[in-house]
Amino acid sequence: MLRFDGEINQESAALINHYLQTGTSVLFVNSQGGNAKAGLQIAQEMIKHPVTVIVDQYCFSSCANYLFLSAQKKSLSPGAVLGFHGGMTGDAPLKNTTDAVYKKAQHDMAQLFRADDQLFKQLGIDKQLIKISYELTKPAIVTVSFNLKTTEKTYTDLSEAEAVKLLAAAMQKKQFESIDLINHAASTNKAYFPSQNTLQKFGVKGIVNYPYPKNKKEMDGMLRDAFQEQIELVGDSN
């Protein structure tokens, strides 16, 4: 058994995968999500093993998309919430961009989208579930930012203009290492909590226990203590 509380990132993905490879078969999770690439890496390892995921209190974003959906058996504890707000659907950003500045980010993102599509096909889950969750929760304004790594420093959350300027300077000094695009398309304060019937409709299998709020009022009261009403839940009872 392993209990995971926290952000999904490269470090936590490496740790979880280590335990999966050494025999852990039950994973208790409590996570707001995190990095999609790291979540996908966990999912790719999970499908090799008979893993049961139990959501202790909440499982949002890449936790829902990858850890919950990829588990052979999956359950929610009483009062726990599963929250989706989109994912890698459609074409990868920058598909038609020819500017050399974005070449690596374009390649990496296209590769990630292909791996995501392959995972959902392997699981037999219709990605319409992810598309619907995005439409129900998407922010009014969608933005992008860039992370730039040089031999001297790592810059995060840059605007396009800032990224281009710093990249040019880094390349001139031969200090450039990598550049990544971050697509801020998902809501940070809104999530879709689908019913068990909805999940099964889109091909999600292995649901063992899935207590679901009876109505919107009950759903609105969930996670109030954990998030002080900072998370708005959209459900099938709305």
Image (cartoon, grey):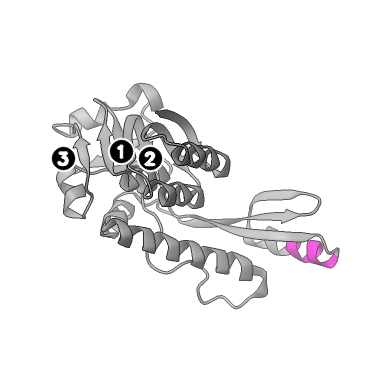
Residue found 40% across the figure and 51% down from its top: 139
Q: Name the residue under label 2.
A: 60
Q: Is residue 10 above or below residue 103?
A: above
Between marks 3 and 1 in the image, the one whose residue lies nearer the viewer: 1
Name the residue beneath numbered marker 1.
82
| Start-end of magenta stretch | 165-172
Q: Are marks 3 and 1 in contact (CB under 8 Å)?
A: no
Q: Do the residues labelled 2 and 1 touch (CB within 8 Å)?
A: yes
Q: Which residue in the structure is indicated by mark 3?
A: 237
Instruction: Establish if 149 lies above or below 26.
Output: below
The kind of residue on which mark 3 rests is Ser
Cα separation between marks 2 and 3: 19 Å
Q: Which of marks 2 and 3 is nearer the N terminus?
A: 2
Tell which residue pokes out farthest to the right in this image. Answer: 173
Residue 169, magenta (yes or no): yes
Which element carries disc 1, helix, strand or loop? strand
**Residue 159 x/y as whole percent:** 63, 57
Disc on the earlier residue, 2 or 1: 2
- As drawn, which residue projects farthest toward the front? 22
